[in-house]
Image (cartoon, rainbow, N blue to C red):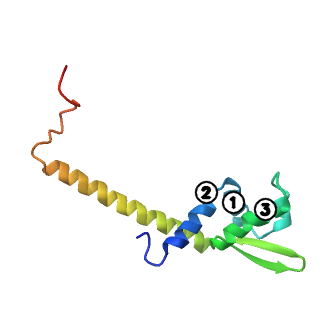
Amino acid sequence: MVVDELSDATVDRLFHALADTTRRDILRRCVRGELSVSRLAEAYPMSFAAVQKHVAVLERAGLVTKRRSGREQLVRTDPDAVGRARQALDELESAWRGRVDRMARLLAEDPGTDENDTTEGPER
């Protein structure tokens, strides 16, 4: 339902990855340029292994790519993946706006509905 070319599993991975503050920060840092996992790990109060796991979640979601350069793993944000997340959100927004518009039309067509009536029930 979300986007034709994005499966539900892909969208789930994207938003699971983006749901974590550390992963969003890693993504922002890597937008500015390629960084090694060890360099990223210096920025967080957690173990190197924990940062590696965060990077792995981002990589599975397609939000970053990694390449090896000697002993280092270099991480870079994939701008196309960020666009896919935006595309999924745009599709959800469109679907909800359509639903709200249909409800508004139905309410406007209902002769028993008085738009100016703000009472919630019989007066006491």
Residue 100 point in image, percent of width and height: 30, 54
Look at 64% across and 70% down and name the residue there.
63
Q: Amino acid at mark 3?
A: Val
- Where's the C terminus, which quadrant? top left
Q: Residues within 10 Å of mark 1 (few under 14, many from 20)?
A: many
Q: Which mark is residue 19?
A: 2
Determine crowd level at label 3: few under 14, some 14-19, many 20+ residues with C-alpha closer than 10 A: many
| Type of amino acid at the residue the image marks with label 2 | Ala
Mark 1 or mark 3, earlier in chain:
1
Q: Determine whether 24 is above or below 123 in the image.
A: below
Tell me, yes or no, if residue 12 can be seen here.
yes
Looking at the picture, which amino acid does disc 1 mark? Arg
The image quarter in which residue 119 lies: top left
**Badge 1 element:** helix
> Which numbered dot is residue 51?
3
Give residue 118's mark.
none
State the image quarter where residue 82 is shown. bottom right
Task: Find the residue positioned furthest to the left.
Answer: 111
Quadrant location of the N terminus in the rendered image: bottom left
x and y percent of residue 113 in the render? 14, 42
- Distance between the alpha carbons at the discs numbered 3 and 2: 15 Å
Left or right of 51: which side holds 18? left
